[in-house]
Image (cartoon, grey):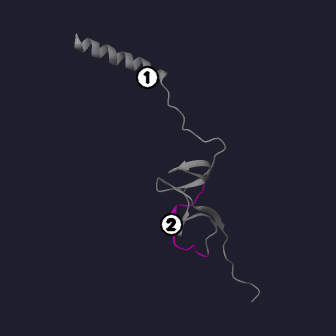
Amino acid sequence: MKSKLILMCLAGGLTMAPLLKAEPPVVVPGSTTTTTVTTHGVWTTVPEDYEGDYYFYNNHYYYGGKRETGDFEWEGRHYKDRYEHEGKWIYGGKWDHHARKHADRDK
């Protein structure tokens, strides 16, 4: 009797499976996502020949990866953007652009 009841429950669960759907991730209204193409990493100083965006936090320059803008709350504080590095979010940094330095051609 127990095995029939278990089989009936399993069969009922299998017939209900197609009716279930995954919920989409929660997105804060007005948020946008920017993804850079370069591989990600960390520098203590930005190389002079680098041209591109970086996220400056705790005296380190993070490049590549993913930056999101919007309204984010972390540890009770609100932030206007965040940066994902190695699967973890960094809050409180500054997103900026580094232009490649060119040698003076007039000399």
Residue at the disc numbered 2: 42
- Where does residue 31 sit, x and y in percent of width and height? 64, 46
Q: Is residue 73 left or right of residue 106?
A: left
Which quadrant does the N terminus fall into? top left
Q: Quadrant of residue 95?
A: bottom right
* Magenta-drawn stretch, dominant element (helix, strand or loop): loop
Q: Quadrant of residue 14?
A: top left
In 3D space, how far apart are the residues under numbered discs 2 and 1 (Cα atoms)?
A: 44 Å
Q: Residue at x 74, y 84 (%)?
A: 105
Instruction: Identify residue type, mark 2.
Output: Val
Q: Residue at x 55, y 48 (%)?
A: 73
The disc placed on residue 17 is 1
Residue at the far top in the pictured view: 1
- Where does residue 93 sit, x and y in percent of width and height? 57, 61
The first of marks 2 and 1 along the sequence is 1
Q: Nearer the viewer, residue 68 or 64?
A: 68
Instruction: Identify residue type, mark 1.
Output: Ala
Residue 96 inside the magenta-drawn segment: no
- Where does residue 26 sit, x and y in percent of width and height? 56, 38
In the depicted structure, whether residue 8 falls above or below residue 99 = above
In the depicted structure, whether residue 73 falls above or below residue 26 = below
Q: For the magenta stretch, what is the residue range?
A: 35-48
Q: Nearer the viewer, mark 2 or mark 1?
A: 2
Which quadrant does the C terminus fall into? bottom right
In the depicted structure, whether residue 14 falls above or below residue 62 = above
Dot 2, crowdedness within 10 Å: few (<14), some or many (≥20)?
Answer: some
Q: Is residue 87 left or right of residue 61?
A: left
- Where does residue 64 sit, x and y in percent of width and height? 56, 60
